[in-house]
Image (cartoon, helix red, strand yellow):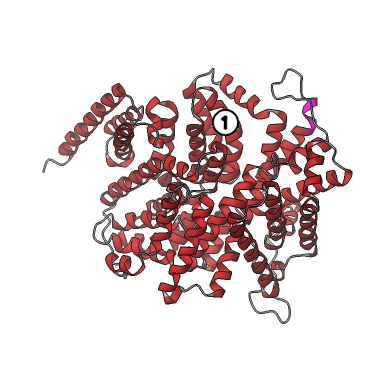
Amino acid sequence: MTELSDREAELVSAHEQERPARQLGGPLRLGVWIVGGLLSVYSLVVVFRPVEALEHRMTFLAVALPLVFLCYRSGWSSFLPRLFRRGTAASPPPETPADGEPEGTRRSERPSVADWLLAAASLAVLVYPLLDIDGFRDRGSGAALTDLDVVAGLALTVLLLEAVRRTVGWSLTIICIVFLIYAYYGAYLPIDWTIGHRGFDLGQIVSQLYTGTEGFFGVPMQVAASYIILFTIYGAVLDYSGASKFFIDLSFAAFRKSRAAPGRTVTTAGFLLGTVSGSGVATTVSLGSVAWPVLRRAGYPKEPAGGILAAGGIGAILSPPTLGAAAFIIAEYLRVSYLEVLLYATIPTLLYYLGIFLAIEIDSRRFSTHAVQVDAPKAGKLLLRFGYHFSSLILIIVLMALDRSAFQSVVIATAIAFALSFLDPQHRMGPKRVGQALAKGTLEVLPVTAVCAAAGIIVGVITQTGLGLNLSAIIVDFAAGNLVLTTLMSGIAVMLLGLAVPVTASFIIAAVIIGPALTTLGVTQAEAYMFVFYYAVLSEVSPPTALSAVAAAAITGGNTYKTMMMTWRYTLPAFLVPFAFVLTPNGQALLGQGPIGTVLLMTAVSAVAVAALALATGGMSGWPERALAAIAAVLLLFLEPVPIVAGLAVLAVAVAVHLVRSRRRDPA
């Protein structure tokens, strides 16, 4: 799994919100990898020799942003012809190699002169303030920016917008532009509009975004330059040390004999691979290339198999110990340790996988699947030989529990994973593999870095104009102060936002706008942020885009819409459980908050609710019992004594009705 095949890379690039990077070659590829490796080394060193926040974030972006322009295609050469093309003319033929170039090398993969100029400009506008960082900071705080400061700030704004367009597309770029227009022209809005403000000139906007830690170099950038880069390095080291192969082999070895084994195997492998890849689409594609042939041999139809692949893939972002990037931002916003965020996510993750496993068990009977013999060593033998790959994962949790910072914990775990690689001669990490892992760690964080820096535009404008509080007030007023309606509207809004922008960006935008709306009505910040987090992630399996499901359908050859709906069915508990910890007093127990007895009881009740959902969506054949099971699930998720008793009673009736109807259909 160290390298994706050409087919897998095409699928990821086609369905991932982050755009594909150039396939560089020759000295340029080596140069980029050296620079990327050095940035990774810098990030590791800073953990133990801290640098002042603004200086660190600027330095990190000064290296990462030029790499974006060299590593990611502009797309203008294909966009402009499509924009002005009439009719349905065929696409231009692919470029052929130049004389002397090997077959398969495309000239378009080389950065153009414009790319080099943009990279140089990026370096210039970020190194410029570093030459006198104290004076630059003082000029910003004293509103005494020079003309050069303003020009450099405006140039960086344009460069970040272009970097975001290259890496994740137009949607987030347009959103950022709208926020900039709002900051500049807000004074022209009608005076009775809640979102109106006095307006800000270019100098004030640049001061907010460029000279402090409220804009480009705010919390999102801090997360990219500190948390995410360290975890991508760790994931790369795990990958190059053979952990990915071990996780897949172990998953196939662990579930061999039952009819539900193939589905369970895929789900378990997705969970384990999530420690290496934080991308739902990439995990789906990597897993699908191995697992789809097994699922097909087991008798799974294309659409259910695609649903299992997508549901397992999205678990890469939902599952501890390496949650998606948004989880690190939660820790920064709440000013709590990353370990505490992991604890928040533990019970919802268990319920998520419980729902998938129950749905798989039901479908294995419905589709009459069967066990498949896979050529893999026995699980015990694998654990004895390669079980050491789990040690670094466990070590991260142990070190954080011992009050080590998340930064130090992951760096130490990375060192342990590197050292343990020498136990496997095939994946021993010599100098070349170490260099590749360090470079890969940086290159994988480039799109997230561009998104986080650009998200600083949105956060900075919201802070400067007070837009966040104004919009949250509008949401609350529209819902007439009703928490249920506000939460429902918030979930829909986050999902719609997630259809257009990546998970990290949708979380940041929603956290500063929707988060205050929920906290105004009495929801704790932890509950509000975790609600937003889950719905931002679930946008990847939500129709009509459902990126992970679309990628899975491309692998299995199934109907895309049906695959989306099967994915939605497998992930249904993840859509409903967040409502429980926002709307019910005992919901905080699902985040691990409260007395241990209450936490265990509410977890057990929620597990029964998840089982009821599984029955409602496929475990029962008739609509009366399905409707009763769905009602029981909703009642149980209220997590209060009376609704719990009522839910259990309704569930018992649903089971009784199902048994009676089944006996009537099959008297024998």
Please identify the residue farthest to the left as the structure is shown: 668
Q: Position of residue 113 (x, y in %)?
A: 80, 64
Q: Residues within 10 Å of mark 1 (few under 14, many from 20)?
A: many
Q: Position of residue 13 (x, y in %)?
A: 58, 58
Count the marks. Answer: 1
In the depicted structure, whether residue 459 falls above or below residue 368: above
Q: Quadrant of residue 613?
A: top left
Q: Residue at x 44, y 63 (%)?
A: 289
In the depicted structure, whether residue 586 falls above or below residue 44: above
Q: Residue at x 70, y 58 (%)?
A: 63
Q: Position of residue 569 (x, y in %)?
A: 39, 42
Q: Is residue 525 left or right of residue 85?
A: left
Q: Nearer the viewer, residue 667 or 274?
A: 274
Q: Nearer the viewer, residue 408 or 482?
A: 408
What element does badge 1 sit on? helix
Q: Position of residue 347 (x, y in %)?
A: 37, 41
Span highlighted in magenta in the image: 184-190
Q: Residue at x 78, y 63 (%)?
A: 116
Q: Nearer the viewer, residue 139 or 161?
A: 139
Residue under label 1 = 514
| Majority secondary structure in the magenta region | helix
Q: Is residue 93 left or right of residue 310?
A: right
Q: Quadrant of residue 608?
A: top left
Q: Is residue 559 visible?
A: no
Query: Which amino acid type corresponds to the residue marked 1 in the rendered image?
Result: Ile
